[in-house]
Amino acid sequence: MGNMEEEDKILVVDDEAKIRELVCRALEGRTLDTAATADEARSKLSDARLVLLDLKLAGDDGMELLNEFRENRPEVPVIIMTAFASIESAVSAMKAGACDYITKPFSSLDDLRLKVDRALREAKLEIENRKLRNLLIEQDSFEEMIGGSALMNKVYNMIDRVADGESTILIEGESGTGKELVARAIHRRSSRQKKSFIEINCAAIPENLLESELFGYEKGAFTGAYKQKKGLFETAQGGTVFLDEIAEMPKELQVKLLRVIEEKSFTRLGGTSLTRIDSRIIAATNRDLKQAVKNGEFREDLYYRLAVIQIALPPLRDRVGDLEKLFKFWVPNVTFEKEAWEIIMSYNWPGNVREVKNFVERINQLGIKRVTVSDLPDDFSGSTSGSLRISGSLVEMVDSYERSIIKQVLEDSNGVRIDAANRLGVTRQALQYKLEKYGLDWKK
């Protein structure tokens, strides 16, 4: 505790000796320093961790001194000491950056001690948070996202700028780029952070169930509706709703979602009364929504309501230098044989960060401490210097590459074929034909 007291030096600035003595007695046991004039206070500010400042200094302007302190040492909290008749000036001082005020004569020395301790705690917390933010920047990471490339720093900056707003957000990017992580980062950095973050994958829930999941239903709305159920929009009241794979939402539900965004209300299935909501909507897609609008698959009015703010996540192949950072972060104690590392760096990583994470999990599960070429998955063990392995006819090479892509997308989709078909931009029937052609056995 001794070291902490030495660190937390409190500077008491008042032109009345009796007040300085009283404050020092009240804060006995802490490291204290005093000043009777503005010049004396200025000379002692550099060592202070907290300042107790009287605004009515003889011959000096306390407000001017406060402004100097806030400019030169903004991290140092200032508590104003003021007479009852000057509470208005104390409030003005707080607007100028003071953290609290206390009236003279002191009605309670315990109140003074509590305010001082609270101000010191909050200042320490802010310093720790600043150090943590700086450390994360040095480690090329942000929230749960790893990478320090120019493209990712642009994403981080955008998240910070829009996090505390109310506008809807559309996150776009290929499968595996981390769209959910962006949505969660926005929620955590917003004023809604203490409320719910509710996620729903529009492609993973059957069409006939998606409406009831989103909006809920009244008792008796359909066979099996034995009691009222709240939907996700109600559950997320005050929080954030994340609609992943928004491009897969059926057209009739797109109309309802548009109404929710515009009117901040909806009606449960089987209900007649409006339910008001206060939740922010973030949507994500790995498809080109503008093209989907042109194809008549997605409502144009809903697209523009969702895309008030757009965040585009770059594919891993465009994030220069981030691939190496991912491996260093996830497997810092694993080494790589030179040839294996060259293949890893030249591989296109169509599954993006998720594919890297799967590979890292494979390394950990197998207990590999030094990765060799034989440890690499078949999908990319033949890559060299950024080119495909030249082996066999053109048709054979194309088939091999197509098979590896389909296999990876199916893995990313947890074997759900309709999800994989959507990600690949083909019909389910076309995907089934390819599965049979390449002997890929996926049951879902």
Image: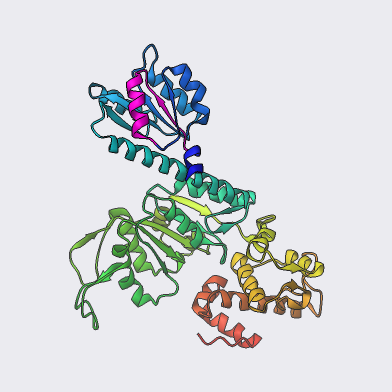
Towards the viewer: 207 or 180 = 180
Find the residue positioned furthest to the top: 59
Quadrant of the image occupied by residue 35: top left
Residue shown at the point (53%, 59%) measured from the top left: 144
Q: Is residue 11 magenta?
A: yes
Q: Position of residue 344 (x, y in %)?
A: 73, 67
Residue 287 spot, x, y in % from top left = 52, 64
Left or right: where does residue 357 sit relative to residue 201? right
Residue 286 position, x and y percent, is 53, 64
Please report the residue visible at 38 percent of the width from the left and 75 percent of the height from the top. Answer: 207
The quadrant holding residue 212 is: bottom left
- Which residue is nearer to you in this view: 92 or 55? 55
The residue nearer to you, when weighing 246 against 12, is: 12
Quarter occupied by residue 401: bottom right
Q: Which residues are magenta?
A: 8-28
Instruction: Please say if 356 is above or below 49.
Output: below
- Residue 171: in magenta span: no
Q: Position of residue 419 (x, y in %)?
A: 50, 75
How many numbered discs sit on the rendered protein? 0
Residue 424 seen in the figure: yes
The image shows residue 339, relative to residue 322, as above or below, that is below
Let me know if residue 72 appears in the view.
Answer: no
In this picture, is 117 found above or below 95? Answer: below
